[in-house]
Amino acid sequence: MPDLSLSRAGAFRHGGFARYWLARFLGSFSAQIIGVSVGWQVYDLTRDPFDLGIVGLVQFLPAFLLVLVTGAVADRFNRVRIMALCLAGEALCALALMLFGLWGSQTAVPIFITLVAFGTLRAFFGPAQQSLMPNLVPAEDLASAIAWSTSSWQIATVIGPVAGGLLYGLSANTAYGTALVLLGFATFLTITIAPPPQLKTAKEKPSFETLVAGFRYIWHEKIVLGAISLDLFAMLLGGATALLPVYARDILDVGPWGLGMLRAAPGIGAIVVAAILLRHPIKDHAGAVMFACVALVGACIALFGASTAVWLSILALALFGGLDMVSVYVRETLIQLWTPDAVRGRVNAVNQVFVGASNELGEFRAGISAGLIGAVPAVIFGGIATIAVAGLWWYWFPELRKVRHLSGRV
């Protein structure tokens, strides 16, 4: 069993991880800038909340359709090179979005097409970068690496949306140009990482069995299945991120900068909780704590949906982010520690689809619901549904409920 006590900066003793962490941060930061800018730009063009759902859908579909390929690629080929190629491709997508702005496009179609390419690159990037992390640090520093890696994304969600809102306030091209430069630097950092030893499946003859190995592993590992599916359905039903432009413009009347603050609030809460977890990791009753936090996430979503006060909306989103961080931390620790390296790419590809479904597909669900019953009822209903999911999973997955310590098998 690895020692899971978190030395606060243990993972950074390894130079490859430090460059990996910074590259991941810059990639996530750029994605947040693009996300805020695209959401505002599309809503400006169409004024239709349904199109905000389309933004999420076109980014999710590539990961869903390519799930049997992306994980297998991460297990068979050099994960560092996959990361670098994907980051370079994302930089080209940022360039394309900037060019659309220069040409003064009056339709959202070119944006959607670019987002399909962006989503495809992210589909290959996700399993590779998630599977690379355990190769960069020894087992005793893995829990620290998981916490810090998750925090890099959360830090990006704090300052990325604010920066995106401010940059888009100057111009869309300024926002996309900044993302282009940062993605280019992230690509350079990734190239400098020395490829670590990796248990590859190159000797396995490609077959349907090898492609579905990730699904098979998750299905038989009920604790992992419960953790992933809990996040999937809770956020699929409770996701409200896609509707933030509606709240910023029509309900709270705070403009692009306010939209950035709303997008940043969950990340602020998550960073606070991540700092607490680094100093005081979950030592007991991890499963029960996760279920309680998911139920409270639903309550925060419903509170945000009903709020018309800016301060209360930001507070509800910050609490949502902090509570969700606990679920993310438990889930990612279980997946990384319990999964053999030879199938880690495929397992992470499946996990990425579940996370994508809970985020991008959840945004699509939110857009459709808002178009049918209005933004406020859609968000409140989603929060209540999240609470219901936490209750159902509590009874359906007793193995997950009874998890006490975050320990893994090597």
Image (cartoon, grey):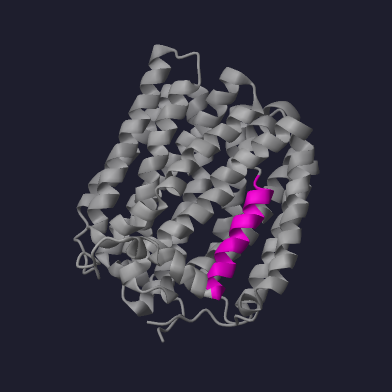
Which residue appears at 64% of the width and 21% of the height? 47
Q: Position of residue 17 (x, y in %)?
A: 30, 63
Q: Position of residue 102 (x, y in %)?
A: 39, 15
Q: Quadrant of residue 87?
A: top left
Q: Is residue 343 left or right of residue 203?
A: right
**The residue positioned farthest toward the bottom in the image shown:** 1
Q: What segment is highlighted magenta in the picture?
A: 222-239
Decide whether residue 237 is among the magenta residues. Answer: yes
Please say if 334 is above or below 192.
Answer: below
| Quadrant of the snapshot with the N terminus | bottom left
Which residue appears at 63% of the width and 53% of the height? 235
Please say if 156 is above or below 76.
Answer: above
Please say if 313 is above or below 270.
Answer: above
Please say if 66 is above or below 256.
Answer: below
Q: Position of residue 94 (x, y in %)?
A: 37, 31
Viewer can see residue 19 = yes
Q: Position of residue 142 (x, y in %)?
A: 39, 73
Viewer can see residue 171 = no
Decide whether residue 246 is among the magenta residues. Answer: no
**Camera-nearest residue between 242 and 319:** 242
Which residue appears at 57% of the width and 44% of the height? 361
**The residue positioned farthest toward the front in the image shown:** 208
Which residue appears at 25% of the width and 60% of the height? 76
